[in-house]
Amino acid sequence: MTPGERIDNRFVVEKLVATGGMGVVYRAQDTQTGQPVALKVLETRSAEDVIRAIQEVELLAKVNHPGIVRHIADGLTKDDVQYLAMEWIEGPTIADRMEKDGFSQREVVEVGRAVAAGLGAAHAHGIIHRDIKPTNIILEGNECTRARVIDFGLARLAGPGQRSLTRTGMTLGTPGYMAPEQARGRRDLLPAVDVFCLATILYECLTATAAFTGSSLASLMANVILAEPTPILDIVPTASPDLAAAITQMLVKDPTLRVANGNVAVAVFDALADIPDGPRRRRIESGAPPTVRAHTGGAVATHGLVLATRGFVDDIVDPPAPSEQALLHDAAAAVGAVLEVLATGSVVVHFAGTARDIAARAARCALAIKHILPQWAVAISTLDPALTLVSDAGTDLLGRAAKAAIFAKTPEARGAILVDPQTANYLDGTFEIDRTSPPRLRGVKR
């Protein structure tokens, strides 16, 4: 579209302001009211994207709340392309504000309450946003009390029986601001998913540090599922303990134990005592790594991962078949580990215990996985107490294994299970290890 073009004989295009996965957004003038609008125009013609665009219109039209961008009109362009006109909100996104001015802790409370109220209105209509992130919240007039939620392109109605528009090999949500149930690729989401996503934003606003990090998509999703963010008071000792506790409660992994929805979150913020303003903190590039708790809930000596994928570590691939997943879960349970199938299709198995014990269990599990998924790349990484570092090291090994599986010229090279050197030292007595760089696990010694 070009400046001056008229849409539906009502909206006059002024300029392009944003592009996204499904469409583009223009600033336009509403000739009926004389007010500016945000005009979202569908860019693709796939049946799924058309259905999703229609669903966004329908869901947004249901909600009328100051914390939610307002629906103005919708229809078709002269080329029969779906469009959605929404009120124009002047102000920075939370992402913009993080980079420039930052937030004080009182402003974090104001943002949290305003966004929670908007989400509460959506949740009351059975709508889950599913993509709450810093770029999807605008501070109208740069005022934290006027935070507005935008972009309902991934929203859907809660509850069973709702048709999913997720294609195989497609994730919904934004890694780093995604709830554990999204990282697992779950379809039966509750409103609590939006609460978790909001909490990751508030954590970052308060600490100027991302709640979850990772050098690859697989490691980031593994951390969302398995790791706990560094405690807020460890990063900002002067922060309000009550505010830190409120955000932590919103970050509970189990959605049934988390703050349930936006309206409950509003009550949590309202119950906070007067929060002093304090200095503003701007986002920094690298944050404190997440800490980790064993899946048993107790402190352990170390942790380990077995990772498997049918592609590269940042690929989104088809997950194992249901019958294969059942076998994989049995293999993990047999060695006392927890197996997760990520939304990317990759598989992660988490171990906790002593270093030597983990090495042996991980090796047996990796061999079982390779037997179930012979064409998949498999890697073992253990012996680091910080799970984020284990994840990064493990996915680096997995990346090498994936390249070997894809490009190797011999079956032996393609079928290799890569092992980090420290783990290999613990396996020498019981398992066959090729001392290549990195080492390769061949099997159990006869």
Image (spheres, rainbow, N blue to C red):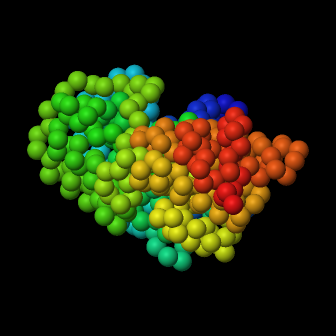
* Relative to 21, 353 lies left or right: left
Q: Residue 181: x, y in percent?
A: 47, 60
Camera-nearest residue between 175 and 105:
175
Q: Residue 51: x, y in percent?
A: 65, 62
Residue for point 54% across, 46% down? 426
* Relative to 90, 344 lies left or right: right
Is residue 179 at least partly visible in the picture? no
Q: Is residue 78 above or below residue 370?
A: above
Q: Residue 215: x, y in percent?
A: 56, 36
Q: How many marks?
A: 0
* Relative to 162, 401 lies left or right: right
Residue for point 28% across, 48% down? 248
Residue for point 41% across, 36% down? 289
Residue for point 39% across, 58% down? 295
Q: Give the residue furthest to the right.
A: 409
Camera-nearest residue between 121 and 379:
379
Is residue 166 at least partly visible in the picture? yes
Q: Give the residue furthest to the bottom.
A: 161
Q: Is residue 338 above or below residue 422?
A: below
User: Looking at the rendering, in which quadrant would you find the C terminus?
Assistant: bottom right
Q: Residue 80: x, y in percent?
A: 74, 54
User: Looking at the rendering, in which quadrant would you find the N terminus?
Assistant: top right
* Relative to 416, 332 lies left or right: left
Q: On the image, which quarter does residue 264 sit in?
A: bottom left
